[in-house]
Image (cartoon, grey):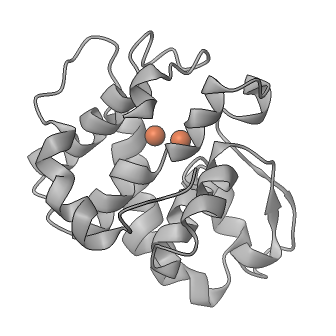
Amino acid sequence: MMLGACVDPTDSALGAASQLTHVLQTLEMMIADGVTDEDLLLVAIVHDIGKVLLLTDEDPANVVCMNRFISGEPGAGLEQATTQWNHDEFGYSRLVDVLPRELALLVRYHSVMPHDLEPYLAPSDRAFAERYHRPFFRYDQGSKSAARRPRVRLEDFRSLVGRRLPSRLEI
Ligand SMILES: [Fe+2]
Ligand SMILES: [Fe+2]
């Protein structure tokens, strides 16, 4: 619900639409596409939780925009590489202990474009990239609209969140 008060000042595809609207647009596109994988739906709900930093005095330059790796060796694996710190990393830090590892990694790298992720993948990361990162990236980026009001409601996903996340999450 806090994302309803967050507007990303750099996201021209969303304009003045809130980050909660963005989350609901993402969920709506996934459902329209027939996605039933609870892992992907859950990650859509929480992936941008780090944008609550926009409600603080944090410089938006440290919160928003697409992300890239700033160190790491090609093929050595995602967890050997480092990205610029942003809302992905903040969200990951709050969710790493409550989500399955691959979903936590998806939160951590969701702002890295698939072609920027690709060189850093170790063979053991490839299943993650194909099953989670690539499909979710398409929904996250491809669902954005400054004008389309989503019909799905956060309330529709309350039971999913209740089943999969702790009742209290420190942000
Ligand atoms: Fe994001
Ligand atoms: Fe997003």
Picture layout, residue 56 above or below residue 110 = above
Residue 124 occupies quadrant: bottom right
Residue 113: x and y in percent read: 59, 49
Which residue is painted at 44% across and 19% down in the image?
13
Q: Nearer the viewer, residue 32 or 51?
A: 51
Which residue is painted at 53% across and 69% down in the image?
104
Residue 160: x and y in percent read: 20, 63
Q: Is residue 28 visible?
A: no
Quadrant of the drawing holding the N terminus: top left
Left or right: where 18 falls relative to 70: left
Left or right: where 31 falls relative to 61: left
Residue 105: x and y in percent read: 57, 69
Which residue is painted at 27% across and 60% down in the image?
161
Residue 146: x and y in percent read: 34, 13
Q: Nearer the viewer, residue 25 or 169?
A: 169
Q: Nearer the viewer, residue 50 or 145?
A: 50
Picture layout, residue 151 above or below residue 125 = above
Left or right: where 48 falls relative to 62: left
Q: Is residue 23 visible?
A: yes
Residue 109 occupies quadrant: bottom right
Hey, which residue is sitting farthest front in the picture?
Answer: 168
